[in-house]
Amino acid sequence: MLPPETELWNRVEQTAREVFGSFGFGEIRLPIFEPTELFARAVGSETDIVSKEMYSFEDHGWIELEQYRAALIVKSMSPGLPSEFTQFERSVLAYVDILSKRMSAGDVPKTPENEKALVQVRRCLDDMNRAGASFVGTQSASDEISFENSLKGVKQALLFFRLGDVLSLRPEATASVCRAYIEHGMHALAHPVKLYYTGPMFRRERPQKGRYRQFYQIGAEVLESVPPNTDATKTIGKDAAVDAEVIEMVMAYFARVGLEGVQLDINSIGHSAPECRRGYVEKLKAALEKVKDKLGADSQRRIETNPLRVLDSKLESEQAIIEKLPRIGDHLCADCAKHYAEVKRQLELRGVAYRENWRLVRGLDYYMRTTFEITARGLGSQNAVCGGGRYDGLVELLGGPPTQGIGFAIGEDRVILSLQEAGKGNRAQGLDVYIAWMGEKTLAAAIRAARKLRDAGFRVELPPVEQKFGKALGQADKLGARYALILGEDEVASGQWTLKTLADGTQGKHSEAGLMEFLRKQKS
Ligand code: AMP
């Protein structure tokens, strides 16, 4: 990203700060990476994001332990050569010994998984020993196979051992906001807690227009602890109003930023109970099983892993089939149906136009009840600029108190693309004044003029060395300056500075104070 495009990015972000601020949101700044476990638990290990799109790494500096392990992993062995095996066993046990000591010292993670891995290594070595000894007498294929399997077991357990914590570059930010909410005891703050964030997210995807591996999101979350003994049926009206206000805010933001062709889709995906979403998913699954042969490979796989995601499919051949599937709206429990009706009423009260879209399920596990997506013009197939929804229960899932949540994430890259497509991108703010100074004696006055003009908010270029008159004006022109302030020794001596308007070539003389006054007037 380069200027002048970065100016558009700044405007898009600044507008978010202003609009979100006017709704009472404060900014939260989050870390770029977090424990992988956080995303696996919050987003869901079966989701595309967690199962294949995260950039994860083991955070440690144990190069020699890594190399030691790599050397053990590549070893192949036959039960017919006991001396080789003895040597291997000795090396593995020495390695296990080092790992145990490091674990006790707290240098590598002392987790139940790591402890289990070391037990597993020892057990597989014993099995290898047994199979090897037996093979010497029998030469049997089954002893050879069990020797090989035990060797595989040793290697797997060694690989399973974590030399450091496993971290991931954040693929989204809601999980981190909830983690921070818990860690900083925000349930004790005045409620609801309203936070917004901006920044890069990372997902391993096939890059195309509007889809990148490092992309930027602007998001907001509303979190509210649920006091003990709260009757959930009594808060439906309030929850729906909060949902509607969050949606109203994001629509107000898009209007302020000047996004065109904005379309809001909403849906309710109920809550995860047998009489609500879970029951629906069973019905959906049964219906999908019946048409399985007509579906593509992705959808076929999703029948097992995440049937709701089949509804997301853009595959042309599946559209007619999907239209005939059972719809969640017909299977919501009474409370969820009431909540959804109230969200729609609240949106209408606020004059927010929406379209109901029963296929809008979103790809993240944590959503319940309200889901929404906003699309915009000029983006081709990647036209979603915002996705969001309600996620009551997520904070609790991550170890916090019972908490309700609703939020959204805007794809900033796509907002920028859409604005550029609409011709709203080229807002390059050119230079105001180029100071053409000539002669060493004028330098002090030139520096003073630059400082005064900059303090007054003008964009000023002060060349570091003096230039010939013609070259200075050429340079001012190239940089798109509106004015050239000409400071020669005569001007400094007389206190009458020359200001040239570059668009029409006119020029006039001004005192130092008069010049500031003149420029200020031109600007306003
Ligand atoms: P999600 O976090 O998947 O709900 O996405 C929210 C919004 O982020 C989407 O509507 C997109 O505008 C944007 N987004 C998601 N993934 C990408 C990506 N790989 N590249 C650019 N924008 C993205």
Image (cartoon, helix red, strand yellow):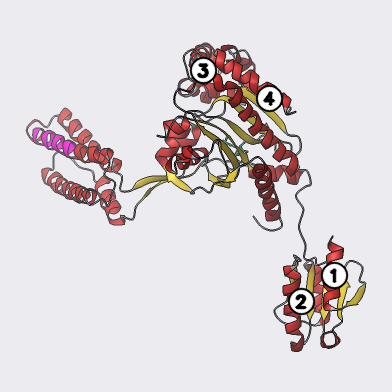
* Highlighted range, magenta: 122-134
Q: Which residue is mark 2?
A: 449
Report the quarter where the C terminus lies: bottom right
**Mark 3 beta carbon near ligand 1 (under 8 Å):** no
Element under label 4? Answer: helix
Q: Horizontal and vertical percent for residue 419?
A: 74, 44
Is disc 2 placed on a helix, strand or loop? helix
Q: Which residue is mark 4?
A: 346
Say if mark 3 contacts mark 1, CB within 8 Å.
Answer: no
Q: Mark 1 = which residue?
A: 517
Quote the CA–CA distance across marks 4 and 3: 23 Å
Q: In this rendering, which labeled residue sits more in front, label 4 or label 2?
A: 4
Q: Residues within 10 Å of mark 2 (few under 14, many from 20)?
A: many
Q: Position of residue 480 (x, y in %)?
A: 80, 65
Q: Are discs 2 and 3 less than 8 Å apart at CB?
A: no
* Mark 3 residue element: helix
Picture quadrant where residue 141 is located: top left
Identify which residue is drawn at 58% across, 26% down.
Answer: 239
Q: Main secondary structure of the magenta part?
A: helix
Dot 3 or dot 1, earlier in sequence: 3
User: Residue 140: x percent and y percent?
Assistant: 13, 29
Residue for badge 3: 277
Foreground: disc 2 or disc 3: 2
Q: Amino acid at mark 3?
A: Arg
> Cα distance, mark 4 to mark 1?
51 Å
Which quadrant would residue 296 be assigned to in this image?
top right
